Structures are given as structure tokens and as C-alpha cells.
Image (cartoon, rainbow, N blue to C red):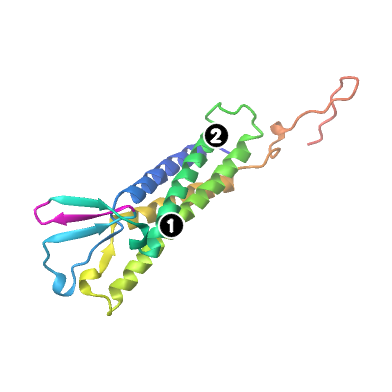
Amino acid sequence: MGSGVQIVCVALSILGLIAVCVTCIVPRWKVSAFVGQNIVTAQTVEEGIWMSCVTQSTGQQQCKMYDSMLVLSADLQAARAMTIISGMMLTLALLILFAGSDFTTCVQNQDVKPKMCLVSGIMLVVSGLLLLVPVSWSAHQTISDFNNPFVNATQKKELGACIFIGWAGGCLLLLAGGLLCCCSRPCGSSGSGGTAKYYSNGASAPNYV
């Protein structure tokens, strides 16, 4: 596996990690929708998975942590666990990828490095899925409530910036993980990776490969 592909995967993974952190921390999953009689308003409500913020027309913003998880919808409750697990798995995958890359000397055994890259690629794919699932679920719930005529216009929300950042970050992680899984070769795939066998008299066995 070329070190150039590994560097690209590291860069994509770092961008994905930034996207996971932004998606998890910034309270911009759902924002107020100005529809119907709610076109002119003095404040904008923004909701995240940890807190909600109210921005006044004067520019002043006030944020408050949720008092209980029970006040959250099911999609945001699941998003808490999934984004945290995604970030932890992504961090571990990056460490394994750094250790198993050809441009580092953390691991001297060249036969182990492809296996480490493969494991890192699988973890990146899982991490990307764990990020895509909650943002897609939240987007589906938000769009359904927006198009539901029985939902009050003042309670309707629009997609926040974190949804789009989560989609972008998840796609980057899937791309990085897919490249690692496809380009990582098993041990012994190259002729130089094998070990020579010796007879009892010290002579090496003939290599017919």
C-alpha cells in the first residue's frame, strides 16, 4: 500500500474528526422556521444535542443546557450516544492508522502494518456510519414535522448547519475507510514479505516464488 494513499486517508480522517466535533458540540441541528404567521419574529431558536440557544434580534444569544434527556426527541437522544462513539472510534482509528502507515516507524514489523491499516479502515467506515445515521434520522424527523399540517407553525424547525456538516464528515470517513480497506494488502502479498526457511545444516530452502 502506497504511503500517498495513507496520507490522503489521514487527511480525510482528520477532516472527518473535525466534522464530528463540530456536529457534536455546536447547537445547530434544528433552527427556527419562519413560515406562516411566524415570518417576523424577534428571536431565533437553535437546538443541538446538548443545549438550545435563543438569539435575539439585537444579536444577543443565550444558551441553556437541557434539564433532562426526556425533553429531547428520540433522534437527538440517539445522536448523543452515536456521535460520542463515532468520535472515540475515529480517534482510535487515527492512532492505529498513524502507527501502521508506511511513513511512520512506530511499528517495525512490515507484515503487521497492512493488517493495522485494514483494521483502521474498518473502524473509519463504522465511525462514518455512526455519524451519518443520527444526522439523517434528525433530518428526516425535521422534514416530516415541517411538512406535517398538524404541527403548529411556531414549532416547525429547519435543518441546521450541523446536519450538513455531519453528512459531509460521514462521507469523508466512508471514503477514507473504503480506500484503506481496498488498498491494504494481506501479509505475504509481495515477494519481499516472506521469510526464508533453513535446513538443519544452515542452507536456505529454495524459493520458487
Is 53 within the magenta? yes
Q: Is residue 58 left or right of residue 84?
A: left
The C terminus is located in which quarter?
A: top right
Mark 2 Cα shell of 10 Å, populated few (<14), some (14-19), many (≥20): many
Amino acid type, label 1: Leu
The disc, 2 or 1, on the residue closer to the chain's N-terminal end is 2
Residue 71 placement (x, y as % from top left): 33, 62
Q: Is residue 34 above or below residue 149?
A: above
Please name the residue that numbered disc 1 is placed on: 132
Q: Position of residue 131 (x, y in %)?
A: 43, 54
Q: Is residue 87 visible?
A: yes
Judging by the rendered image, the residue that carries numbered circle 2 is 101
Q: Residue furthest left?
A: 58
Main secondary structure along the magenta-highlighted residues: strand
Give me the residue at 59% from left, 43% from top: 118
Q: Compared to 153, does 70 lie above or below?
A: above
Q: Residue at x 32, y 54 (%)?
A: 162
In the rendered structure, the answer to whether residue 203 lies left or right of residue 108 reads right
At label 2, which amino acid type do we have? Answer: Ser
State whether residue 72 appears in this view: no
Residue 84 sits inside the magenta stretch: no
Decide if residue 17 is on the left or right side of residue 57. right
Q: Residue at x 61, y 35 (%)?
A: 113
Read off the magenta span. Answer: 50-59
> How far is disc 2 from disc 1 in space, using C-alphas?
27 Å
201 left or right of 129 in image: right
| Residue 168: % across, % down | 38, 53
